[in-house]
Image: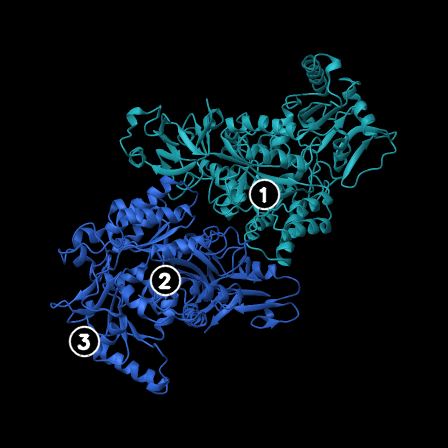
Chain colours: A blue, B cyan
Amino acid sequence: MKRIFYNGIVRTVDERRPVAEAVAVQDGIIMAVGSDDDVAAWAAGGQSRATAGSADAASDVEWIDLEGKLMVPGFHDSHLHLLSYGLSLEKVNLGQAKSIDDIVTEGRAFLKARLVEFDGPQGVPAGWWLQGRGWNNDYWEDSRFPNRYDLDRITTEYPVTYTRACGHIIVVNTKALEIMGVTRETPQIAGGRIDLDEDGEPLGIFREAARDLVYNAIPRLSVEDIKRLLVKGAIPMVRCGITAIQSDDLEAVPEADYQRVIDAMTQLDSEGKLPLRVFEQCLLPPVARFREFIAKGYRTDKRGSGVEGNGRFRIGPLKLLADGSLGGRTAFLSGPYADDPQTCGIPVFTQEELDELVKEAHDHDMIMAIHCIGDGTMRMAFESIEKAQKDNPKLDMRHGLVHCQITDEGLLKKFRDLNVVAHVQPIFIDYDMHIVRDRVGEAMEKTSYNWKTMLDLGVHVAGGSDSPVESFHVLNNLYCAVTRRGLDGQPEEGWLPDQKMSLEEALYIFTMGGAYASYDERVNGSITVGKQADFAVIDRNIFDLDPEEIKKADVVMTVIDGEIAYRK
Amino acid sequence: MKRIFYNGIVRTVDERRPVAEAVAVQDGIIMAVGSDDDVAAWAAGGQSRATAGSADAASDVEWIDLEGKLMVPGFHDSHLHLLSYGLSLEKVNLGQAKSIDDIVTEGRAFLKARLVEFDGPQGVPAGWWLQGRGWNNDYWEDSRFPNRYDLDRITTEYPVTYTRACGHIIVVNTKALEIMGVTRETPQIAGGRIDLDEDGEPLGIFREAARDLVYNAIPRLSVEDIKRLLVKGAIPMVRCGITAIQSDDLEAVPEADYQRVIDAMTQLDSEGKLPLRVFEQCLLPPVARFREFIAKGYRTDKRGSGVEGNGRFRIGPLKLLADGSLGGRTAFLSGPYADDPQTCGIPVFTQEELDELVKEAHDHDMIMAIHCIGDGTMRMAFESIEKAQKDNPKLDMRHGLVHCQITDEGLLKKFRDLNVVAHVQPIFIDYDMHIVRDRVGEAMEKTSYNWKTMLDLGVHVAGGSDSPVESFHVLNNLYCAVTRRGLDGQPEEGWLPDQKMSLEEALYIFTMGGAYASYDERVNGSITVGKQADFAVIDRNIFDLDPEEIKKADVVMTVIDGEIAYRK
């Protein structure tokens, strides 16, 4: 099947030909890029644009008029959680809640609606849990954490778990605690915390590694369930122009385990039902599970030039969660929090533990994607990566750090010096700019979230959303990267305005930047002859408009492997 | 083993960090690039530069003082003939001959010296041929071709073959004709010519495909012989800073066949004795041989990220000779030669034949390297490549054309539009600038040898020498690319001066340009952390000097896989 997209403004993200009007595609591969006339010439053989807009059976060429709209390479989100997002569609969304009362009210309304769907209490599936996520007490007037007693106001009959927006803290109700078997006698978990009240009773609040107690109690999903949720989660992403993601799913949700997730992905892929490309960031705690995974022969798939097959699902890096979140003050800083000198956050690993894990992965040809928010964690991660490479030098290992928020000049250079990929989420600005100075002080703020400096230094930067932590709407993400404003347009001058990227740079990190990180730069990430035909079409040319238009713009078409996956 | 090269001017050919002072290497891989202090910090652990210049057994770090000299990535010559060059070292070099008398005199002197080496006529190995190459009648006052009778003046006892500088025309003596069994009755060969005198007697001149008659008569080399010649040929290249070549050897010399050459290369590689990296441009006529090669499972090795092994020898493209040379007027032009309106040159294939060969290679995941000098051939080659890709779209096929000399604007754009690599030889300027206008006229001259235009258009350009046709001294090649002068420095303003490259561009095509063409850009071609440690060190900083200094400069050190392969 041949398709010609013409009459567009094509931003290729290929410096060898940055702008074009038209693109020809055949069997999923880009065959020609150029002016409308160039590409029409490519299609020569009697076919003319007079038949534009309709498939011409005789010549097997479909002409698609872009109507002057903007075409860019399909977006690449370099860090999100597809399965979590799919699951979130069947959970209470607490992102808008403004108080503990709000999260209770929303929970009650959700339960009521679910009971109707289930056809009354008799129809509730065995082992069903009411789950919610996205609350953020930093937005509330009374910013205390909710606890079991608050959630008991929703229900005492069904277990309830509410995950904080950051994902690193979970609150459950009393029914859930019963099922989990957690009491005052339950020992604390290394690398995490079970919050207790003054009497030593569990408050239902579980941080970091202690979340495992919740996860272990929630019933498992079948492979078929996981397939349904992956597709359910991916479709809205495709509608936002996303054609490739790096997704953290394997042991990321309590309801699934890594083998079922891999089986679900692999089955969808071989059935041709995976809506987008997935480079799996393999979260595999505890270490025994990682070793089992390696023993099964799984390795980072460093695709060559596509000759190994055109599958959409590939094993990516080993994902490690090395600290928590800035909001929850669990990100590990090199010094105390400015607004809570009692703590530096929680490093999940000791240096020795991290060294060992990174070395083991590196030695088995797995690259890393290490969640690092605090500068303390980042320093540890760089040390582990440097040691692993010194111990066993390997070619072209694209180890990466995810989030990379609190940095100083030395750390920024370290990305370049070790050739470590920075996975960043410009959309985080929307929330984080309100807390960074409080958390780390003004001096450290200046050198943090310094993604423009990274680009100027020559660091490989890849853009992502961390969905469902933040929305995966790439245009919002581009907006934040370019303006350094919140989604409300404030502050007008932008937060740390010297860190504004050009729109070209922002688009690069959400296309080629991600493709580089997933060893895909040879076959994806730009509109170049011989690459996969993945495109997003945007309703206006945001390159020529006021940056405020970026967040107002809309994706009107998404093309994957040359097929129109979405059209508004 | 760790080595630190410091106190240099390092031009990395990596736009993310173009200039540095020092490089650290371990186990053949680049570990750190930066200032002297940065790299010293990398080596930290008590080791200091105070011990510079000597291997420090205690710390296993060798410090190498670059003494302010220029370090660049190891040079990549994207088209030459290693085995032919090795063989040429045991042949008469006729490159300096100024007349037919000269080639006779040199032949006689060579024979005399050989007979001494062989310890008299009794010691001459059975089947020995006196071979010479490099004569070019265009340089002579009397520019007629030499013939059998001229060569009979050297010897009538031993067979003599003299190959023209272009490689496309061979002259033999009468003894050789006897061994070959060529007489007036021998039929002409399609795609070639046996020159006859007025009486129909063979003159001993064999053009293009007719050369096979000579090749078939020359005795074969053993695998051990070939190994010896490959090493003999590669060592002088390494001394010129070359660390990677794309070499055309398989059926390129009459003395060897493809399987023996592959066996010789593979054995040298596995024995650790191959002096440099070889991406083999597989010349495999006739087509039955190519099919046999494919049936054996050989394919272009599109290296991923080095995980498939670090072998130096890899199968590259299928090489096709689609026309001849400009000097010999066998390059196929779209119109008649300006200085010989009787001929357009000789296309080796019909369009249908070329289409079929290219399709067959493409379908079997072999990329192409098609020798095209004339614009007529180039048009045919582009058509075949475009058809093959339309018939069977494939990702990231880096088909290439070799020489790419006579072009018009449309052809220059075609390289970009089809993403076809241009393998060019700037050193050709030295000779060709004297004949191009004569051959193709002034209008066509203007758009020919337009390599700077190619770069500006975004074409992937790779630089080479075509050794032994021209010298593989890369610095001379860079000089010609930058100045567009002959090696005598004339004309001062340069030939087609708008086509001068910057030295950065010229260096790019002889490093990254070649690496791209051989699917090596992820692991080679620039001085970047995580790549193979291949370097050339030059005695002066040619970036800061008058371009005339480029050809006077000297390579003083060559590093391959982190090992010092040559040091002056």
Q: Quadrant of residue B298?
A: top right
Q: Quadrant of the N terminus of chain A?
A: bottom right
Is label 1 in a helix, a strand or a loop? Answer: loop
Q: Amino acid at mark 1?
A: Thr
Q: Quadrant of the C terminus of chain A?
A: bottom left
Within-10-Å neighbours for mark 3: few <14, some 14–19, many 20+ = some
| Residue at x 36% of width, y 38% of height | B32
Is label 3 in a helix, a strand or a loop? Answer: helix
Which of the numbered marks, if any, corresponds to residue A192?
none
B272 vs A5, nearest the viewer: B272
**Residue A360 point in image, percent of width and height:** 38, 48
Please name which of the two marks, 2 or 1, marks the residue nearer to the observer: 2
**From where the camera sits, is residue A376 visible?**
yes
Q: Amino acid at mark 2?
A: Glu
On the image, numbered disc 1 is attached to which residue?
A: B447
On the image, numbered disc 3 is attached to which residue?
A: A149
Q: Quadrant of residue A164?
A: bottom left
Q: Is residue A433 left or right of residue B233?
A: left
Within-10-Å neighbours for mark 2: few <14, some 14–19, many 20+ = many
- Distance, label 2 to label 1, CA atoms, is 60 Å
A512 over B273 or under it: above or below: below
Q: Amino acid at mark 3?
A: Tyr
- Distance, label 2 to label 3, CA atoms, is 29 Å
- Distance, label 1 to label 3, CA atoms, is 82 Å
**Residue B90 point in image, percent of width and height:** 65, 22
Q: Chain of mark 3?
A: A
On the image, numbered disc 2 is attached to which residue?
A: A251
